[in-house]
Amino acid sequence: MLSTLLLVWVGSGMVAAMQRNYFTNPPVNCGDWGTIAVTLVAGPLNYLGANPKITECQLPEPSQ
């Protein structure tokens, strides 16, 4: 039951990301990847007015 709910939740987030054309061009920075990720996690909240966006993020630098 819980796995079905999770699948429907993330599936609705996937549909919202597709409707917003997030998959037409490949993501070029971590902000684009973050926006896609939070849209998937938001799921059906996207249809209640949520429009999550990540504008910039800082990736850790590799150690020397």
Image: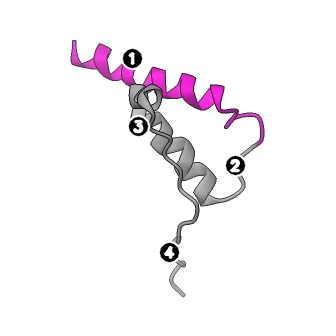
Residue marked by disc 3 = 41
6 displayed left or right of 1: right
Mark 2: which secondary structure?
loop
The kind of secondary structure the magenta stretch mainly shows is helix
**Residue located at (70% from left, 33% from top):** 21
Judge by depth and name the residue closer to the eye, 49 or 4: 49
In reply to whether residue 21 is colored magenta, the answer given is: yes
**Mark 2 or mark 4: which comes first in sequence?**
2
x%, y% of residue 41? 41, 37
**Which amino acid, mark 4?**
Pro
Q: Which residues are magenta?
A: 1-25
Numbered badge on residue 8: 1
Marks 4 and 1, how far apart in space?
33 Å
Q: Residue furthest front?
A: 49
Marks 2 and 4, how far apart in space?
19 Å
Mark 1: which secondary structure?
helix
CA neighbours of label 2 inside 10 A, class few (<14), some (14 to 19), many (20+) = some
Marks 1 and 3, how far apart in space?
11 Å
In reply to whether residue 23 is colored magenta, the answer given is: yes
Pointers 2 and 1 in contact (C-beta within 8 Å): no
Q: Is residue 57 above or below residue 49?
A: below
**Which amino acid, mark 1?**
Val
x%, y% of residue 4? 31, 14
Locate the N terminus and report the quarter of the image it occupies: top left
Residue marked by disc 2 = 27
**Mark 1 or mark 3: which comes first in sequence?**
1
CA neighbours of label 3 inside 10 A, class few (<14), some (14 to 19), many (20+) = some
**Which amino acid, mark 3?**
Val
Q: Is residue 51 above or below residue 61?
A: above
Number of numbered callouts drawn = 4
**Mark 3 or mark 2: which comes first in sequence?**
2
